[in-house]
Amino acid sequence: MSMTRREAAAALAAFVLPLEAQGPAEPPKLGFFTPAGAKLVEIFANVIIPPDEYPGAGDAGAAYYIDKQMQGPLKHKLEEWRTGLFTFNSVAKHQFQNRSFLLLKPEEQKAFIDGIAQGQVPALRPIFDLMYDLTLQGYFGSPEHGGNWKQASWTMLKIEDVMGNWDHAGHKAKGVAK
């Protein structure tokens, strides 16, 4: 029995698309963040949504989601990010005897982030709010956008079919009546 190109493409898509929705086998290359910037965002994301029996937001690729957004729809926020991350690290150095945020102990990192959330460092509130919002988007959104690797948050929430038999273009999935 021979197959048309369309049938072959549909069969391949049925196999490949679910794998892509799980997230990358290896972290993708960064386009906006330096490795240190990505690590800072990963730590921040894991403080906001910490790991337990499920991966935290940082472990589920929130930094890669944000990196991807900064190269596309959020390009207009590049300067805000650069300034915010610089200020974030500068304030950490000031508060912790010239140690950068990445060199702090995990409990110090958490205390620093908690202090920002509680309004103790008003200058950092804009970057905190931006990182917080994008961390949530990266953790709970579709893996195709760079975060939520292996559908970590969907698994945690026991969501089996986030798209409800709809693909992202708004079409019914194959085999579902319109």
Image (cartoon, grey):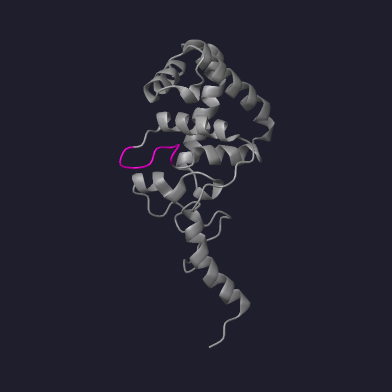
112 part of magenta stretch: no
The spot of residue 86 in percent (x, y) is 60, 21
The spot of residue 70 in percent (x, y) is 63, 36
The spot of residue 118 in percent (x, y) is 43, 15
**Could you say which quadrant of the image residue 89 lies in?**
top right
Residue 157 visible: no
Residue at 40%, 46% in the rendered image: 152
32 or 57: nearer the viewer: 32
User: Is 37 placed above or below 28 here?
Assistant: above
Residue at 55%, 53% in the rendered image: 168
Look at the magenta stretch and give its main secondary structure: loop
The extreme left residue here reads 53
55 part of magenta stretch: yes
52 or 122: nearer the viewer: 52
User: Is 166 placed above or below 74 here?
Assistant: below
The extreme bottom residue here reads 1
Total marks placed: 0
Q: Which residues are magenta?
A: 52-59
Residue at 53%, 29% in the rendered image: 131
User: Is 178 placed above or below 55 here?
Assistant: below
Residue 76 visible: yes
User: Is 21 placed above or below 29 here?
Assistant: below
